[in-house]
Image (cartoon, rainbow, N blue to C red):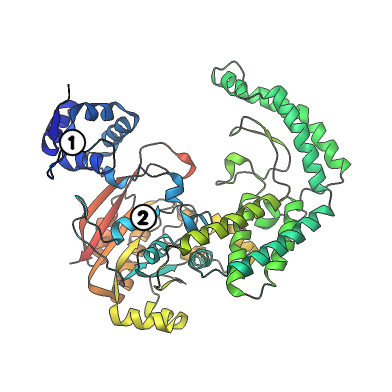
Amino acid sequence: MTELLTIKQASDWATEYLKKNITTSNISYLVNYGRIKKLGDNGSTLIDKNELITYYKSFYGNRELDWKDQLGDDLNWSLSFDWLKEKDTTKHVHRLHPYKGKFIPQLVEYFLDSHTDNFKKQVYFQKGDIVLDPFCGSGTTLVQANELGINAIGIDISAFNAFISNVKLAKCDYVDLNNEIKKITHALKNFIAQTNHLTFENELLAELNEYNKQYFPSPEFKIKVRQKQINELEYTNEKVNNFMPTFEKLVKKYNLKIVQENTDNFLGKWYLQTVKDEIDLVFSMVKQIKNITTKKILSVILSRTIRSCRATTHADLATLIDPVTSIYYCAKHGKICKPVFSMLPWFERYSKDTIQRYAEYEKLKTKTFQYCLTGDSRNIDIFAEIENKNPQFAEIVKNHKIKGIFSSPPYVGLIDYHEQHAYAYDLFGFERNDNLEIGAMQQGQSKQAKENYVQGIADVLNNTKRFLANDYDIFLVANDKNNLYPRIAELAGMQIVNQHKRPVLNRTEKDKTAYSEIIFHLKSK
């Protein structure tokens, strides 16, 4: 039998049914994002109680309740964006290059766009306004601002981060880019054809496929490991050792040089000689490209390519442990795998993907200004730097001032923002400013490190607020487990007027543990 409830009745019923506080906003979220059907007419919203029961017994309902148990009832599930697919959260140029520690574009869009809802009671930014991101990272705020018709300025201490951000916003000459990609791909294929490593790799793969079918059948092998019928460590060590003579015989047969002689820098340590030779060839051709924008785009394609070609296991790509120069047991795939001996497949894949992403973004772009400056947000003169880069944009900034900030500051001692792109710094020769990172990983999470962090973020706010409009709005995304942001706000002469606590469902490396972050809304006192 169907029993229909109003939003308020559904809230009261769910609170009693679940023995926990379920607000009318919680119920509205389920309706607005299609978790349960909206019934009723004449403007009234009614809900089928049976659908509500089904939802709270489902995976999504259980997860929502479980996370709220762990993280608190103040968790705003509407900011989980759990209805989105990965292709939505990595849309168009947002996945032009990997970057650890970035927020999803929909979170930026939520606070920058013109909508209001049960949680966002007012509009903070209008079309034509200027938003600032003093910890720009890979440019998510800038890219979304453009999509929304909002001007934007980014600042980042990492030269490579600023480079990625500005390339995402570049005006692509598709004909020139395609021509240069074809030219480089043709040269790379010719270069590989004159070496032995492609033939070597094909023969190695054929041998590995047969060996894996025999000793690592899928899914039988993984099932036996899970049921502890096989001691995974002993078995895999034995099978790797048994195959090693075949690998060594092929290396000798094709007279292949795998390990580099100079391993003092990142490119020497983390790339096989065959890959490094290809990198050198492609980079030499990129440097000769006359169209500056095309050269920058191809530099990003090359950087993305070589990141995927590091000599490591599939499971350790994001957190490098030890260089891998021969076959190995891959826990991720449950079989014996090999390191990358050629960058060609990756270069071709990422070249095609890049053009497609630019084309998708081109349809959404607005005629607004965005630029990421390389500098220290604690002392940079934003107006002067923008004047140097774009006088036309500088006039807009000076006349209208910056309406506010949307940014995700670095966390204390968590990510090494320079080292994650060490391969690019080695290759392109960007100047490193590791010592100027706020919350640098090498400083750890000691009491002193936290004090330095508080002062650093406060210094950024104090410096940047002199460029802001009087009625500014600042949104800072942080997992403030150490409760540092109240002190940061105080030192910056600001007040925290609201906090939006959101669950973070899809974290780097597919971490499934309950995790949340807070969007702090700051204004002047």
Return the residue found at the far top. 229
Return the residue found at the far front. 42
Left or right: 495 in relation to 258: left
Circle 1: element type: loop
Q: Looking at the image, is 372 positioned above or below residue 260?
A: below
Q: Quadrant of residue 405?
A: bottom left
Contact (Cβ within 8 Å) of mark 1 with mark 2? no
**Could you tell me residue 220's position as x and y percent?**
61, 20
**Could you tell me residue 295's position as x and y percent?**
62, 70
Comparing labels 1 and 2, the label whose residue is closer to the camera: 1
Q: Looking at the image, is 122 positioned above or below residue 250?
A: below
**Could you tell me residue 505's position as x and y percent?**
38, 41
Task: Specify the amino acid type for callout 1.
Answer: Ile
Task: Specify the amino acid type for callout 2.
Answer: Lys
Circle 2: element type: helix
Residue 22 circle label: 1
Residue 59 vs residue 473, the one in the foreground: 59
Residue 53 vs residue 511, the one in the foreground: 53
Q: Quadrant of residue 292?
A: bottom right
Figure quadrant of the N terminus = top left
Q: Is residue 393 visible?
A: yes
Q: Residue at x 34, y 53 (%)?
A: 478
Q: Looking at the image, is 36 positioned above or below residue 430?
A: above
Q: Is residue 429 visible?
A: no
Q: CA distance from mark 1 to mark 2?
A: 36 Å
**Could you tell me residue 402's position as x and y percent?**
30, 73
Q: Looking at the image, is mark 1 or mark 2 earlier in the sequence?
A: 1
- At label 2, counting other C-alpha atoms closer than 10 Å, the crowd grade (few under 14, some 14-19, many 20 or more) is many
Q: Disc 2 designates what residue?
A: 450
Left or right: 152 in relation to 214: left
Figure quadrant of the C terminus = bottom left
